[in-house]
Amino acid sequence: MAYRNGTYVAFHAQGTAYPIESDIKYFNLLKAWNVRDESEFNFIDSHEKASATRDESKKETLRHTLITRLNNSKNMILIVTENTGKDTDWVPLEIAHAVDKCEIPIIAAYPDLKKISNPSLLSYLWPTALHARIINQTAHVIHIPFLEKPLADAIGQFSHEKYPKGDALGYYSDEAYTGWGIY
């Protein structure tokens, strides 16, 4: 495998490149947080570490590029919304490769939540590929709200060398949320 220091971000694009019509808006927010001078949030974007692809790329070329990006990643952020489970091509492939081949932890980030203390209650949002790997205990997942401080902490803390506690149903303590000023 390649040098693994990037963070791979997976989301359901809903077949469109228009930011307001898909979950790509959350990926763009991550990138905006990353470039702000006053931000403590930073990450190495695995999407910038491999060649760019275009919407008209052939499916096999896109698949190869995604796999290359995952192979260069230490962890993966999976943006989980009500749409994520509807993805039947790329998100399942990304989850399967991240868990089965790369053995990297997944940071499941939920935009509509402020705090998570019982991840199993969110199973209705999980894509089938994630659900299966949580059930069979092959995935290492931390479930967090899509907020800057928890994301920064998870990106900095978890990697292919250090997994979240709680195996597939990891989450942050009340004390961590209090420390971030999230109640």
Image (spheres, rainbow, N blue to C red):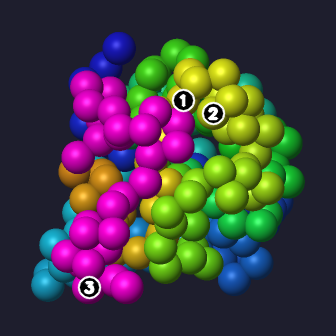
Chain part drawn in magenta? 157-183
Q: Is residue 42 above or below residue 26?
A: above
Mark 2 closeness class: few <14, some 14–19, many ≥20 residues within 10 Å = some
Mark in front: 1 vs 3: 3
> How far apart are the alpha carbons under marks 1 and 3?
29 Å
Residue on which disc 2 sits = 134
Q: Residue 56 at what x, y percent from top left?
A: 76, 48
Question: Where the C terminus falls, by quadrant?
Answer: bottom left
Specify the label residue 139 is tagged with.
1
Q: Mark 1 touching mark 2, by CB under 8 A?
A: yes
Residue at (57, 66) in percent of width and height: 110
Q: Secondary structure at mark 1?
A: loop
Depth check: give the residue in front, 96 or 145. 145
> How far apart are the alpha carbons under marks 2 and 3?
29 Å
Residue on which disc 3 sits = 181
Q: Secondary structure at mark 2?
A: helix
What amino acid is at disc 3?
Answer: Gly
